[in-house]
Image: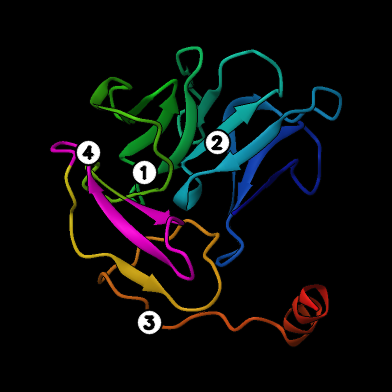
């Protein structure tokens, strides 16, 4: 997915471009601004756009289908959408909150600030546990009970950095580390 002005730039509409299909759709009622800068993140399938002006203002979530804008409560930071766009996981001061994107009401609140990838059920979060001495693992937390939602998966290699939720609870393959990064790391260790 990509965002930007239309290729023709005749009406300055904000558009969402699906890179895989080439389809372009305009976001209703929203204009692209070259002067009013903000940081944007796109949810899976490009349904929601997180707008951050980089100031103390609350985050706003733009529905790219309807053009509606939803403002998160002050202090809530968007972490991840469920793959089907039905839920949004946010974190605030010592609280993780899951919102329904249909009603924009809280459906789940759990003590502790938690980041990670939200499952389609809106209850399970996959996160990278970096507490291991030599290895890291992907762990699954059930937000409803606060307990584990499955066995941890050890991440092969040095460390994990991306938010991942393996669909079948296993990693089918890993991305090999480039040779130049391995060489640079060895040079720094010596």
Which range is magenta? 126-146
Give coordinates of residue 141: x percent, y percent: 25, 48
Label 2, label 3: how far apart the Cα atoms are:
29 Å
Q: Which residue is located at x 44 percent, y 23 percent?
A: 92
Residue with the most extreme left position: 145
Q: Which residue is located at x 46 percent, y 18 percent?
A: 72
Residue that carries the numbered disc 3 in the rendered image: 172
Residue 146 vs 172, above or below: the answer is above
Label 1, label 2: how far apart the Cα atoms are:
11 Å
Give coordinates of residue 79: x percent, y percent: 47, 38
Quarter assignment of residue 56: top right
Residue that carries the numbered disc 4 in the rendered image: 143
Q: Which residue is located at x 22 percent, y 38 percent?
A: 143
Residue that carries the numbered disc 2 in the rendered image: 49
Quarter assignment of residue 149: bottom left
Question: Which of the marked residues, 1 or 4, is nearer the chain's N terminus?
Answer: 1
Mark linked to residue 131: none
Instruction: Look at the numbered discs 3 and 1 and tell me whether their residues touch, using CB distance below 8 Å.
Output: no
Label 3, label 1: how far apart the Cα atoms are:
24 Å
Residue 158 vs 151, above or below: the answer is below
Residue that carries the numbered disc 1 in the rendered image: 85
Q: Which residue is located at x 51 percent, y 47 percent?
A: 46
Give coordinates of residue 101: x percent, y percent: 34, 31
Label 1, label 4: how far apart the Cα atoms are:
18 Å
Secondary structure beneath label 3: loop
Instruction: Look at the numbered discs 1 and 4 and tell me whether their residues touch, using CB distance below 8 Å.
Output: no
Q: Residues within 10 Å of mark 1 (few under 14, many from 20)?
A: many
For the N terminus, give its image quadrant: bottom right
The mark lying in front, picked from 2 and 4, is 4
């Amino acid at each position: 997915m990509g965002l930007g002005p239309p290729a023709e730039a005749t009406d300055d509409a904000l558009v969402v471009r699906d890179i895989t299909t080439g389809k372009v759709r305009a976001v209703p009622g929203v204009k692209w601004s070259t002067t009013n800068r903000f940081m944007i993140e796109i949810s899976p399938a490009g349904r929601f756009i997180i707008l951050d002006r980089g100031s103390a203002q609350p985050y706003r979530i733009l529905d790219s289908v309807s053009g509606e804008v939803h403002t998160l409560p002050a202090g809530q930071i968007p972490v991840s959408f469920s793959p089907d766009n039905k839920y949004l996981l946010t974190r605030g001061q010592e609280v993780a909150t899951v919102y329904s994107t249909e009603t924009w009401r809280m459906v789940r609140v759990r003590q502790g600030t938690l980041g990670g990838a939200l499952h389609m059920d809106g209850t399970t979060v996959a996160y990278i546990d970096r507490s291991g001495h030599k290895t890291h693992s992907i762990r699954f937390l059930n937000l409803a009970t606060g307990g584990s939602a499955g066995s941890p998966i050890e991440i092969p290699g040095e460390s994990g950095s991306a938010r991942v939720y393996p669909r079948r609870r296993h990693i089918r393959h890993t991305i090999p580390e480039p040779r130049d990064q391995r060489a640079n790391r060895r040079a720094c260790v010596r």
